Image (cartoon, helix red, strand yellow):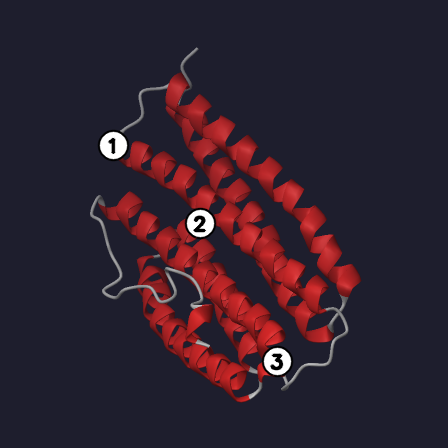
């Protein structure tokens, strides 16, 4: 039976709420993954890996709801854009969760090994990633195009910091071969955080399309697309 328009709008509101819940859970995973690495808390790192299952279940539930909405009524063009954006956004959120798990696994590998230098840039990059994800989710839920622009702009700062971290870590590996393994782990953590920010940019580009019907692309090439180049060390 076709949904009434009022019921359909209620379903769309519920859909936004579920995506916000999924995104918030993932944002907390990113926060805790970085904290587990910095504090060298292997138990906390392990908990993040298990929490990823809940995020995956949320993604499946939202996908099912999106398909049901498409099947139950002939949506307007704006509805189709919103549902299509939702399907893409939850894919980006799920991948952000995967990167939080990747960071947690690095935290487990490093364990209680003494850091060769205090971790300063990684926590900073983690804070930027969390802020971008929060803004991206707010942009989606509140249909806020100003936040769309903010996230795209903030990604430039992330790319600059990531490039600086890559240079520093490679220099450290060249100067002290004994730190190569640990520095390579940290290089991958920086890459995972940079990719999280790229997924945030993807989210807001989808929001812009859903709201305006026009594609909005960041006017730069995301850093680290090919991953850390350890051979340069």
Q: Which residue in the protein does label 2 denote?
A: 141
At 41% from the left and 72% from the top, the residue drawn is 158
Location of residue 218 with respect to 13 vertically, above or below: below
Q: Are marks 2 and 3 in contact (CB under 8 Å)?
A: no
- Disc 2 from disc 1: Cα separation: 19 Å
Which residue appears at 70% of the width and 69% of the height?
110
Residue picked out by circle 1: 77
From what the image shows, is residue 98 above or below residue 61? below
Regarding mark 2 in the picture, which secondary structure is present there? helix
Q: Which mark is residue 179?
A: 3
> In which quarter of the view is residue 232 placed?
bottom left
Q: Nearer the viewer, residue 119 or 211?
A: 119
Tell me: 70 left or right of 101. left
Indicate which disc residue 86 carries: none
Q: Residue at x 37, y 68 (%)?
A: 155
Q: Quadrant of the N terminus?
A: top left
- Label 3–label 1 contact, CB within 8 A: no
Q: Residues within 10 Å of mark 1 (few under 14, many from 20)?
A: few
- Say if residue 60 shows up in the picture: yes
Instruction: Please state which of residues 129 and 119 is positioned toward the viewer in this rendering.
Output: 119
Element under disc 3:
helix
Pointer 2 local density, CA inside 10 Å: few below 14, some 14–19, many at least 20: some
Measured as percent of width and height from the top left, residue 80 is found at 31, 32
Indicate the quadrant where residue 223 lies: bottom left
Among numbered discs 2 and 1, the one appearing first in the sequence: 1
Mark 1: which secondary structure?
A: helix
Residue 24 appears in the picture as rendered: no
Q: Nearer the viewer, mark 3 or mark 1?
A: 3
């Amino acid at each position: 039976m076709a949904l009434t328009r009022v019921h359909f709008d209620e379903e769309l509101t519920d859909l936004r709420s579920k995506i916000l819940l999924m995104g918030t859970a993932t944002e907390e995973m990113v926060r805790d993954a970085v904290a587990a690495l910095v504090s060298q808390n292997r138990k906390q790192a392990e908990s993040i890996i298990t929490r990823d299952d809940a995020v995956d279940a949320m993604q499946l539930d939202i996908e099912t709801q999106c398909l049901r909405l498409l099947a139950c009524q002939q949506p307007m063009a704006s509805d189709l854009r919103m549902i299509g954006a939702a399907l893409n956004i939850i894919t980006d959120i799920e991948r952000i969760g995967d990167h939080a798990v990747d960071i947690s696994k690095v935290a487990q590998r490093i364990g209680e090994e003494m850091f060769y230098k205090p971790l300063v840039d990684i926590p900073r990059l983690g804070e930027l990633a969390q802020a971008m994800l929060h803004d991206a989710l707010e942009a989606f839920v509140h249909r806020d195009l100003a936040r769309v622009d903010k996230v795209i702009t903030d990604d430039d700062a992330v790319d600059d910091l990531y490039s600086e971290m890559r240079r520093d870590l490679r220099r450290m590996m060249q100067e002290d071969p004994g730190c190569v393994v640990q520095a390579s782990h940290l290089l991958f953590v920086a890459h995972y955080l940079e990719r999280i920010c790229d997924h945030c940019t993807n989210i807001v580009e989808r929001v812009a399309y859903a709201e305006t019907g026009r594609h909005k692309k960041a006017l730069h090439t995301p850093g680290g697309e090919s991953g850390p180049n350890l051979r340069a060390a």
